[in-house]
Amino acid sequence: MKESGNDSIFLRHEWFDCWWRSHAETYEDAQNLSILLIEDKGKCIGIIPLKTSRVQYRGLKVKKLGFLESGLSPCVDVILSSEKEESIREALHFLKKQREWDILILNKLSIKSENYKLLEKILKEENFMFGIKSSLKNPIIPTVEHWPNFLSKRSAKFRKSLRYKLNRAERLSSFQIERISEPNDIKNILPLIFDISKKSWKAKLKQSIADRIVYRDFFRYFTDEAGKMGWINVWLLKNSEDYIAYEYHLMYDGIAYPIGADFDESFHQLSPGSILEYHIIKSLFEDPEVKEYNTCAHNYKYLRNWTDIIEPYADIEVFNSRSLGALLYIVEYKLRPYLRRISIFKHAKDYLIKKNIWVRNDDRVTS
């Protein structure tokens, strides 16, 4: 991992092992591992963690080749220790000859990644049928400056709102913050985390951890694996006798990653999510071992209050010219953009005619 220059916890074998054990049977139809190994003189110099599955794409059932990832995965990448450009080129040529897939989707690649830039360059040079779509825009909070100085740089409106929430919580409740880091303690509180999740607003949309057996299984498996490595911190917010909010964090190489968070919706008037988030971020700034808080989220408004630093991600879609993929590429990246342009032009024309900027004469439009 360190040799690849991309030492991410989300590329470690512990992460992929727990992900596969929890997702393999239930996440998608006919899902199979398709790990691609790249060797040089008998030595493995690269790994591309892939799986095959049957999915819907624009209403059609297609054979998809893609990263080992789901909504739990903040990011993914290929793992290469050397000869990166040549390795990616050879891997793409190898895959191009296969008939076992219609579309290769590489989700959640950081556009700052060297591998992302090489993929884009090689796909263009080798005339692959491919397209790139914007993905997550992930807010990042560096935690290396003094907390009071950092907080003073937040907007006056945000700081006022935050003070109001903190003062109101202090008046109306007896909040306590707990940080759990011992492996056995974390395992023992997983049922509590799932219970809070069942009471969250996400549960109403069937999007909570408690609603997805694959997510619950993943947290159990990964708590066993990562807990003993010292990679997990669970933060809890307690109101009197009730635990009403949590955040499940991974800590790796000086970076904190919150991969799970919920609060009991019945206490929403106390802003438990905001209260817990404030105390966590403050604690991370005060911890000399932490250099960054990676929010593992999209650039939602509440996160933009905390930082202006955004790390953009992208999805690369590569279409197999030997299969249905060629048709999908034409529809997705040729026909649909053309139809959108026509639609935009039509709406613009109608607006200009309505405003008498263009005048219609004999079914012709002239300026």
Image (cartoon, rainbow, N blue to C red):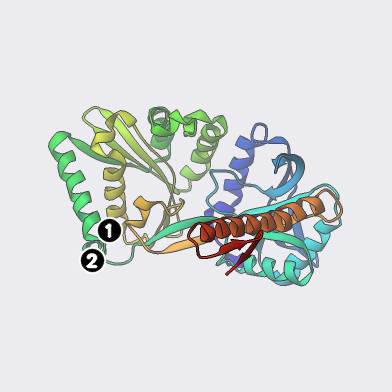
User: Where 192 falls versus 358 (above or below)?
Assistant: above
Q: Where, by quadrant of the figure, is residue 242 drawn?
A: top left
Q: Secondary structure at mark 2?
A: helix
Of callouts 1 and 2, the N-terminal one: 2
The three-letter amino acid code for the residue at tag 1 is Glu
**Residue that numbered label 1 is attached to:** 286
Which residue is most to the left?
A: 171
- The residue lying toward the viewer, choosing from 256 and 74, is 74
Residue drawn at the location 15% of the way across and 44% of the way down: 167
Name the spot of residue 47 as percent of width and height, x first.
70, 57
User: Where 156 falls versus 17 (above or below)?
Assistant: below
Q: Describe residue 307's horizontal placement relative to residue 330 as left or right.
A: left
**Residue that numbered label 2 is attached to:** 149
Name the spot of residue 217 as percent of width and height, x first.
55, 33
- The residue lying toward the viewer, choosing from 317 and 177, is 317
Residue drawn at the location 82% of the way across and 63% of the way down: 93
